[in-house]
Image: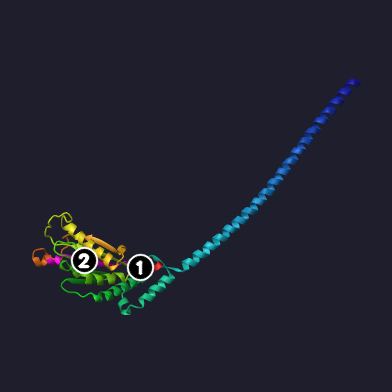
Amino acid sequence: MKKISVVVLSALCLMACVSKKKYVALEQDNGELRSELTKTKVEKEDLEAKFSAIQKRVDNYNSKINELTEDNDSKLVSVDGTVISENQKKAMRESLKKVPPAYMATAKTLKDSMNLALQFNLKSSMDNIEEDEDIAVNIEETVVMISISDKMLFNSGSYKVSNKANDILQKIANVINSEESLDVMVEGHTDNKLMKNTAAVKDNWDLSVLRATAVVKKLQNDYNVAPEQLIAAGRSFYQPLTDNDTKENRAKNRRTRIVILPNIDKFFAMMSK
C-alpha cells in the first residue's frame, strides 16, 4: 500500500514539475510578445509622426501653389479666347492711344481694337507707296494687297529681279519691318502664253513660283525682312485680272502680288515675350 502511495506521489510531483516548466516557458513567450508589441507600437507612433510631418509639408506646399495660382490667375485676362497678362493688356491699350478714336468706333472687343490699330498703322505706312500704272495698292480691312507689274520686276520670261524694282521693294520692306506681327505672301502670276521649255523653267507654274521665290529672297537678303514672315506662292495663269485676249490684257495679268496680313495671334504671342 505504501509503495502505491509513493508511486502516486512521485507521479504527481513529476506532473507538477512539467506544468511549471510549461508555465515558465509560456510566461517567457508572453513577455517576448509583449516586448515585440511595445516595439511595434513605438515604431507605429514614430511612423505616424513622420507621416504627419510629411502631410503637413504637403499641405503647406499645396497652399502655396494655390496662392500662386490665384495670384497668377488674377493677373491674367482672356481676350477673345487668348489669355494674356494684365501688363500686356495695358501695353495694348497704350498702343491704341495712338489711333484716332473715330477709327476705333466699330471695335467691340480688345481683339477688334488691335486689328483696327494694325490696319491703321499699315495704312499710314503705305502712304509712302505711290500708285501708278505699274503699282496698285488695295486695302481690305486688315489685309494689304500690293500688285506690281511684270515689267517693273522682271525682264520678259525671266525670274531675276530687275534693279528697277529696288525702290518699291525697299518701301515694302520698310512696311514689313515696321511690324513683327505681319505675315507676307508673295504671289507670282503669269499670262496664259505658253512658256518655252528650258532647264529651269518648264511651264507657267515654274515661272510664277520662281518669280515669287526671287522676290522673297530679295526682301530677305537685300532688305533684311525676317524669313519667317515670308511665304512664296505661284499662281501660274489661273487667277487673271482680265481675259488673256489682247497684248495689253496679258500684260496686266503678268504681275507679282504682295499680300500683307496682320497676324493678331502672333501679335499676342509677341506681347507675351
Q: Residues within 10 Å of mark 1 (few under 14, many from 20)?
A: some
Indicate which disc, 2 or 1, sits on the residue closer to the N terminus.
2
Report the Cα–Cα distance between label 2 and label 1. Answer: 24 Å
Per the image, label 1 sits on a secondary structure element best described as helix
Range shown magenta:
251-264
Image quadrant containing the N terminus: top right
257, above or below 42, in the image? below
Which quadrant is home to the C terminus?
bottom left
Q: Which residue is mark 2?
A: 257
Q: Which mark is residue 218?
A: none
Residue type highlighted by circle 2:
Arg
Q: Position of residue 155 (x, y in %)?
A: 15, 65
Q: Which residue is at 28% across, 63% downward?
A: 230
Q: Is residue 174 magenta?
A: no
What is the quadrant of residue 4 in the picture? Answer: top right
Nearer to us of marks 2 and 1 is: 2
Identify which residue, 36 or 139, lies in the foreground: 139
- Residue 26 on image: x %, y %: 76, 36
Q: Looking at the picture, how far across and down is residue 12, in whole percent?
A: 84, 27
Q: Amino acid at mark 1?
A: Phe
Secondary structure of residue under mark 2: strand
Q: Which residue is mark 1?
A: 267
